[in-house]
Image (cartoon, grey):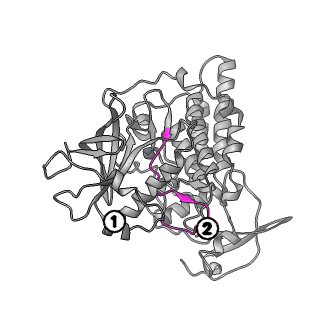
Amino acid sequence: MTALANSLNSSYLPPAPSLLATSRSSSSGLEGRTFQFIKGSVTLAEIIGRGSYGKVYAGVFKPLDKAKLIAVAVKVNFDSKGLPSLIAEASTYDRLASLHADPHIPKMVVHGVIEQASNCKNNLYALVLKRYKESLYAFLKSNPLKKSSFSALLARQLVVALRSLGSLGLVHCDIKPENVLVSKSGTLKLADFGSARGLSPENGPEYLCSRYYRPPEIAFKALITPGFDIWSLACVLFEIFLGKVLFPATDYKELLDMHFEFLGPAPLTLVTAAYPDYNNFFTLLSKEDDPVQYAYPKYRFSQVVARENRTTFFRKVLQAKLDSCVGSDAEKSAHIKNIKNFFSLIRRMLTWESKDRATPADLLNEPLLVNAIPARQLAFKRPRSHHLALSPAREAPPPESPVAPPPESPVFILQYTETSSASSDSP
């Protein structure tokens, strides 16, 4: 336990004596072994996920005070480098336990130190969570959503989860379909809080969030705020509604190119933190009667050019969705209205600066989400075989049309004029 305690960089320490597990198996691996905790016992089954520092096992938890068994997913740390993150995640789940009324936050069953495995040098730490059948990523693959009302329901659930996190001063920092779980009733659970952060002036930029859902704050070294999750959620909602990734970048440079294509010029105050010598890379722009200066890159950051401009892509999928509406005139009109509202909602969540993004309270007042139908009215087709708590890593999206048009104006364009000239050095 000394080595364990010394490796922690968090003020949270596990109640070691009461949760120290004992094993009833002498096998060399963890599969099939049973570990006794103060609240009950956990028996591990097959591996259902792997990470940089550990593995996730399917398992069964048998409470001491109940006869009913609980299906669980057990995160086990095998590397001391990942231990602080897992300890911090357990601490976050402890804080989230105060949100008893929020059905969109999964509950932690138990956590603590388990005995040393024969093939490992250090004691292992386990985080035991209730297990759900599949992730949202797997769910969407087997249940493509055709109606905007279904998408609005899923959107509302995730916005409610973000509102709950905000009430505790937490930012998830890794929202993506793989980190959203789906219960049998269709209720979404926002999971995997290993990257979660609190709000602090010292909460500076880090390498966070999966690339497709990563907001501009990371590239521009801005502070992490609740708006971080709003951007990621917008990308997820786009994927829910259309089954397509909005920003399928291959690296951080292409991601920045995509952000500029979609949003247009960025506020100069945002750019200068990451590019003190911005005059070499950006053209300064201004708008009449607007004191804010803007910057737009002179050159692409990435060498990837054989793809569709993001603004063109956004407009194209919107038009295709509108053209697909069928039914009576009244039904078609209502469906078109919902589609436009959904795209408008997503657009309000995607801005350069997090302070300009819609908040959970704003989003929950949107008519589209206010009128979202209850989960019990959804009749989704369930696949025969379910993914467990973790889904396998997704494959990279197929290449888009090999079109490389010149940069276009973003949706909701501002009229800019160049205010200064600068060197033509390439970044």
Magenta segment range? 189-207
Is 426 placed above or below 158 here?
A: below
Residue 157 seen: yes
Type of secondary structure dominating the magenta stretch = loop
Residue 67 sits in quarter: top left
Which residue is under mark 2?
A: 222
**Residue in the foreground of this view, choosing between 77 and 286:** 77
Q: Quadrant of the N terminus?
A: bottom left
Residue found 18% across the figure and 45% down from its top: 24
Q: Amino acid at mark 2?
A: Ala
Proximity of marks 2 and 1: CB atoms separated by less than 8 Å: no
Residue found 54% across the figure and 20% down from its top: 377
Element assignment for label 1: helix
**Residue 243 on image: x %, y %:** 48, 39
Residue at the top extreme? Answer: 328
Q: Amino acid at mark 1?
A: Leu
Inspect the magenta stretch and tell me whether residue 358 lies in it.
Answer: no
Residue found 58% across the figure and 62% down from its top: 216
- Report the Cα–Cα distance between label 2 and label 1: 33 Å
Q: Residues within 10 Å of mark 1 (few under 14, many from 20)?
A: some
Residue 406 seen: no
Which residue is under mark 1?
A: 4
**Residue in the foreground of this view, choosing between 72 and 41:** 41
Is 120 placed above or below 74 here?
A: below
Inspect the magenta stretch and tell me whether residue 200 lies in it.
Answer: yes
